[in-house]
Image (cartoon, grey):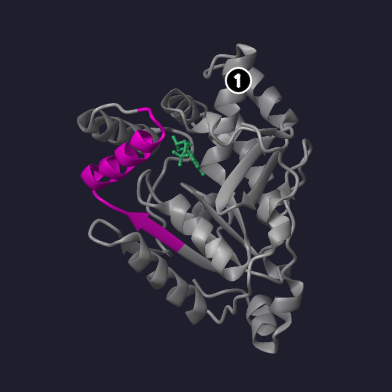
Amino acid sequence: MIGPPLFRRMVRSGRSELLMGHRTFTSSPTAPRGQGTDQRPAPIIAIDGPAGTGKSTIALRLAKHFGWRYIDSGAMYRAVALCAAERGIPWTDEAALVRLCAQLTFTFAIREDQLVVCVDGRNVTQAIRRQAVGAGASQVARLQGVRTILVRKQQELGGAGGIVMDGRDIGTVVFPGAEVKFYLDATPEIRGRRRWLELQQRGEPPSLLEVIEAIRRRDQDDRSRSVSPFRVVEDAYYIDTTNLAIDDVFELMVDKVKSFGVSFRSPDSRQGMGCPQST
Ligand code: DC
């Protein structure tokens, strides 16, 4: 959990303030490996955990609070599933999905307190949240070829530091050297309830029991897949959010990040550039 020496040195000397650049994050179609843990001037905050633990809400708030960028890795799996469906590629056709992934460019921006997700310049923020797309994401996430390419793109997007990234394998596979790692958890019932409330707000209202059942199935699929199965990150700071309000979780995490010597600055409005408004 303790950050690499270079990062700690820079934070103490105040250089982290100067070195944390802000811009829209874009992955290139041919992304090189970009982890470079020992040369990173600003931290990487990894947040892992199952669906419905409040990861994305908290990750966005943390990114804004500290003036860093936010990369939602699950959104990338969802975007691949969406683009595949639109092109008639089955979610099981690994060779075609790998070719598709390699061509896609992902862009993340924070605009009006929301994460905006674009693929090849197209705003897919709303489209990727549909339940059917989530089911597709779970399928494509089982394929090693897809994971290899998306992990590389995630490393390219976040390798320079100054980011919060959430997902299932951020602290274990994508950035095992992240300065601060969190693992958020909660019971399937409470996670199902949270997801159900979200779906209600989006006008896609299945029954509560259906959503809890879907969460259990998704957990089971993610944990039992043969490729990069989802597991608890052992060196992460574990938070059971079952009985905690989102504000309490946020405060806990801010304190933890600060305890690593990380100072914060106000967010930069330029983060909103680069994605079209329409969905
Ligand atoms: O967090 P989410 O529901 O948006 O994720 C969508 C799917 O992608 C879900 O089945 C888990 C999978 N996923 C993954 O395997 N690895 C990640 N880093 C992020 C998500």
Residue 237: say if magenta. no
Dominant secondary structure (helix, strand or loop) of the stretch shown in magenta: helix
Question: What residue appears at the point 40 percent right and 58 percent down from the top-left corner?
Answer: 183
Which region shows up in magenta? 182-204
Q: Which residue is mark 1?
A: 84
Q: Which of the two residues, 81 or 110, is positioned nearer the viewer here? A: 110
Q: Which of the two residues, 229 or 30, is positioned nearer the viewer here? A: 30
**Left or right of residue 136: residue 221:** left
Using the rendered view, name the quadrant where residue 238 is placed: bottom left
Q: Give the residue type that dot 1 points to.
A: Ala
| Residue 137 sits above or below residue 274 on the image | above
Residue 192: say if magenta. yes
Can you give x and y, in whole percent of width and height, for residue 37 in the image? 67, 64
| Residue 25 sits above or below residue 117 on the image | below
Query: Can the viewer see residue 26?
Result: yes
Q: Residue furthest top?
A: 88
Question: What residue appears at the point 59 percent right and 31 percent down from the top-left corner?
Answer: 79
| Residue 34 sits above or below residue 259 on the image | above
**Left or right of residue 67: residue 232:** left
Can you give x and y, in whole percent of width and height, for residue 158 in the image? 66, 55
| Residue 2 sits above or below residue 59 on the image | below
Q: Which of the two residues, 36 or 105, is positioned nearer the viewer here? A: 105
Can you give x and y, in whole percent of width and height, for residue 237 in the image? 40, 66
Quadrant for the C terminus, please.
Answer: top right
